[in-house]
Image (cartoon, rainbow, N blue to C red):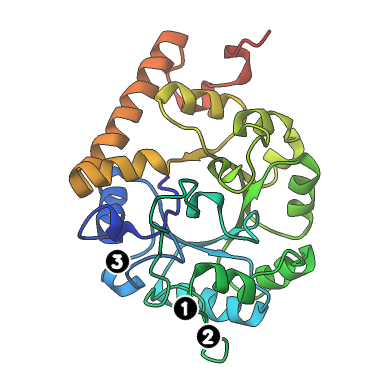
């Protein structure tokens, strides 16, 4: 699946249209970020049935409901809630003193939840006014009940949180460490995936996001119980090189590598992949 990544127009002139078309042509799902440079209609005028909408957790749950309803009306297939980013990511800061500060365009994003009564000047200001680390499982449960769309939580690393997710009625979780951009030195995604109880994997979909760079990485994730994986950086690299076709090339390379790994391990179908094929000292 194509992970939610902000500001696609920074990588390709067509923006999120390129990723959506590539996903449709490759037969996979695309998650459009709330930091999208285009609105739902611009991304695809015909069908968003292969598109999920991602948004952060906000202080104002009603504001979230408003944008979730827009995604539902537009025809999106699911809602992806990022639950591990209550503050701005470290990648948004420059560590070189002589370098110019990085300024991100945050006032003209059509899918970016905002309230006219709560103006903001920049991304840091936005996070301070709109986000809160105090959001609770009850807030997520309320959001799940507010929409007909399946809700998936992105940013789960602990098995206890995976169990809580099942209890409140979400349809899936994404094992993710946000690419190490929220908190360095957290557990690796494959290691975290290995801790998720089988009873969770039997009740809801479990996905993996972060660190996928080859088809063998995909094989490992599937062997540890993931239903599918997300690609973020790899997808952006493809878009930056050659737009839609570049992303299709990336998906094709990963698919060929996965097939080769399956052949070499004697797996003729995805459902034959299991942890018995993995070795760990």
Name the one closer to the observer, 110 or 148: 110
Instruction: Give the spatial CA distance, label 1 vs label 2.
Output: 21 Å
Disc 3: CA contacts within 10 A as few (<14), some (14-19) or many (>=20): many
Q: Is residue 91 visible?
A: yes
| Number of disc labels | 3
- Front: mark 2 or 3: 2
Residue displayed at 32% across by 49% down: 23
Instruction: Give the spatial CA distance, label 2 vs label 3.
Output: 26 Å
The residue that label 1 is drawn on is 70
- Look at the numbered disc 1 and give the secondary structure of its residue: helix
- Look at the numbered disc 3 and give the secondary structure of its residue: helix
Residue displayed at 64% across by 70% down: 131
The residue that label 3 is drawn on is 43
In the image as oriented, which residue stretches furthest toward the bottom?
A: 117
Q: Is residue 44 visible?
A: no
Q: Are discs 1 and 3 less than 8 Å apart at CB? A: no
Residue 41 — which label?
Answer: none
Is residue 11 toward the left or the right of residue 173 in the image? left
Is 269 placed above or below 241 here? Answer: above
Residue 253 placement (x, y as % from top left): 29, 28
Name the N-terminal-most of marks 1 and 2: 1
Q: Quadrant of the C terminus?
A: top right
Name the N-terminal-most of marks 1 and 3: 3
């Amino acid at each position: 699946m194509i992970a939610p990544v902000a500001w696609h127009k920074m990588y390709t002139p067509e923006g999120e249209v390129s990723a959506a078309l590539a996903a449709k042509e490759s037969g996979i799902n695309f998650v459009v970020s709330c930091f999208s440079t285009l609105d739902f209609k611009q991304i695809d005028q015909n069908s968003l049935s292969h598109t999920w909408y991602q948004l952060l957790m906000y202080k104002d749950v009603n504001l979230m409901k408003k944008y979730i309803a827009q995604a539902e009306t537009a025809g999106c297939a699911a809602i992806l809630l990022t639950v591990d980013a209550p503050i701005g990511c470290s990648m948004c800061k420059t560590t070189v003193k002589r370098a110019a500060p990085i300024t991100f365009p945050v006032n003209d994003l059509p899918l970016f939840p905002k309230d006219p009564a709560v103006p903001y000047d920049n991304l840091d200001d936005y996070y301070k006014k709109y986000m809160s680390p105090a959001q609770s499982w009850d807030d997520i449960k309320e959001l799940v009940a507010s929409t007909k769309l399946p809700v998936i939580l992105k940013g789960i690393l602990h098995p206890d949180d995976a169990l809580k997710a099942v209890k409140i009625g979400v349809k899936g979780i994404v094992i993710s460490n946000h690419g190490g951009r929220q908190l360095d030195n957290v557990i690796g995604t494959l290691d975290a995936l290995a801790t998720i109880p089988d009873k969770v994997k039997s009740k809801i979909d479990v996905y993996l996001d972060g660190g996928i760079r080859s088809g063998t990485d995909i094989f490992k994730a599937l062997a540890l119980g993931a239903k599918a994986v997300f690609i973020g950086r790899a997808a952006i690299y493809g878009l930056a090189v050659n737009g839609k076709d570049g992303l299709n090339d990336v998906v094709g390379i990963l698919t060929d590598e996965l097939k080769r790994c399956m052949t070499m391990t004697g797996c003729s179908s995805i459902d034959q992949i299991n942890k018995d094929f993995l070795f760990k000292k």
